[in-house]
């Protein structure tokens, strides 16, 4: 069975398979090449990108995107974005607008007339079946014109506050909190182990230099145990272990680079952090750049220049100790580059989505967290050794 369709600028013969149901007949008519071309041309003016950034995504949405990326990588954040744009999507809105286009309405009328000549169903039933399939066709045509990708939903200037906790490796900050021999944290009570050492590494401060400073400036020898007559054997053993940690701990500093935190500030950080926390660097950076970078390379945190009340400020985040569990800590405003090792994604968390976030505790001005990010240089390949004869 066939009928001639004349509508708009097209004339086409529509073949309908004998014995086809009404829905099948409608699909065959709307899948005709000329009909599809007419629909595609008509909806062109309604087409829009699904993942269009309107410049005003909420902080909460951006933080959830960052969280999805840190937990699951690129695929996870793209799936999260797709889900948030799914119902109703820009294509849904565009299809609704295109549905009322005069050319589409005329096409439906002409298809009803054509199918009515080769079908026994009532015009109303044919029209309902055409519109049911037409809605799908409109969405298909509009979706085909969409060239956007999920990450287009994040603007290049959409910042999010993130915290680097060295050594966290996918755990929670609570799992890697520094330890002390007293409830209250201070240089005299903290244990210098793998949990605290990263703070000194980020600050590029040598152990002996810090120990000497505290001994000479504060009159405290961190490497020696100090006992009270009333202390139990258990408490004495703890103190001995604490002192030994300051004698035995080792790490590498870069003599060609300056100390990022003064020894006085490090002493202050340890003493003003109340219940300790985790070594941390908290920055506010463009989320899209953070996601799209090559995570197999080192990440360089660069200073940003901010104009604040007529003054130019140089800042690269907040460096120090932060306690996500109890909401204490102490940080200083960093102004120097810091290089984060490669493959460090699992050492990051979204500050305001993790326990007591920075803003909840300190309520700092926004510029205090700003920083830039860029890829560092790959580590040099090991030299190949000649085989032993």
Image: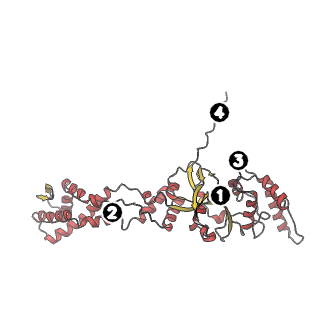
Q: Are marks 4 and 1 in contact (CB under 8 Å)?
A: no
Sequence-first tag of 2 and 4: 2
User: How far apart are the two marked residues, 3 and 2, measured between alpha carbons?
Assistant: 54 Å
**Disc number lying in front (1 or 2):** 1
Number of the front mark, 4 or 1: 1
Question: Which residue lies under the disc numbered 1?
Answer: 334
Residue nearer the viewer, 78 or 308 = 308
Q: Are marks 3 and 2 in contact (CB under 8 Å)?
A: no
Element type at mark 2: helix
Please report the residue visible at 33 percent of the width from the left and 60 percent of the height from the top. Answer: 48
The disc, 1 or 3, on the residue closer to the chain's N-terminal end is: 3
| Left/right of residue 337 with respect to residue 157 in the rendered view | right
Alpha carbon distance from label 2 to label 4: 59 Å
Q: Looking at the picture, how far across and down is residue 189, in whole percent?
A: 78, 65
SS at mark 1? loop
Q: Nearer the viewer, residue 262 or 323?
A: 262
Residue hosting label 2: 91
Residue 104 picture location, percent across and down: 20, 63
Q: Are marks 2 and 4 in contact (CB under 8 Å)?
A: no
Disc 4 or 1, which lies upstream in sequence? 1
How did the renderer colour the structure? secondary structure
Q: Residues within 10 Å of mark 3 (few under 14, many from 20)?
A: few
Pointer 2: residues within 10 angstroms few (<14), some, or many (20+)? many
In the picture, the quarter occupied by the C terminus is top right
């Amino acid at each position: 069975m066939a009928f001639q369709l004349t509508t708009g600028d097209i004339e086409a013969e529509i073949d309908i398979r004998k014995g086809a149901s009404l829905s099948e007949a409608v699909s065959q008519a709307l899948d005709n090449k000329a009909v599809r071309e007419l629909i595609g041309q008509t909806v062109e003016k309604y087409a829009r990108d699904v993942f269009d950034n309107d410049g005003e995504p909420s902080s909460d949405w951006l933080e959830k995107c960052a969280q999805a990326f840190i937990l699951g990588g690129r695929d996870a954040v793209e799936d999260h974005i797709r889900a948030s744009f799914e119902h109703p999507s820009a294509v849904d809105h565009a299809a609704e607008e295109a549905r009322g286009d005069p050319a589409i309405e005329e096409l439906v009328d002409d298809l009803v007339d054509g199918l009515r000549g080769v079908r026994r169903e009532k015009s109303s039933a044919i029209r309902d079946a055409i519109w049911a399939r037409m809605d799908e066709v409109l969405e298909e045509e509009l979706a085909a014109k969409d060239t956007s990708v999920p990450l287009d939903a994040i603007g290049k200037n959409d910042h999010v506050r993130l915290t680097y906790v060295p050594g966290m490796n996918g755990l929670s900050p609570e799992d890697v909190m520094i330890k002390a021999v007293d409830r209250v944290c201070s240089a005299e009570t903290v244990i210098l182990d793998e949990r605290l050492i990263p703070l000194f590494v980020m600050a590029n401060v040598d152990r002996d230099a810090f120990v000497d400073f505290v001994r000479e400036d504060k009159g405290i020898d961190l490497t020696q145990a100090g006992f009270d007559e009333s202390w139990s054997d258990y408490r004495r053993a703890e103190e001995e272990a604490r002192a030994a940690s300051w004698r035995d701990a080792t790490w590498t500093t870069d003599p060609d680079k300056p100390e990022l935190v003064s020894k006085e500030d490090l002493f202050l950080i340890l003493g003003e952090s109340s219940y300790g926390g985790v070594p941390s660097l908290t920055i506010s950076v463009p989320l899209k750049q953070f996601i799209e970078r090559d995570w197999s390379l080192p990440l360089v945190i660069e200073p940003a220049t901010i104009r604040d009340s007529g003054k130019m400020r140089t800042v690269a985040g907040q460096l120090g100790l932060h306690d996500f569990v109890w909401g204490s800590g102490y940080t200083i405003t960093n102004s120097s580059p810091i290089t984060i090792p490669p493959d460090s994604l699992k050492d990051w968390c979204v500050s305001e989505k993790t326990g007591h976030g920075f803003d909840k505790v300190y309520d700092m001005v926004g510029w205090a967290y700003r920083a830039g990010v860029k890829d560092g240089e790959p580590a040099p390949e090991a030299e190949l050794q000649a085989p032993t004869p």
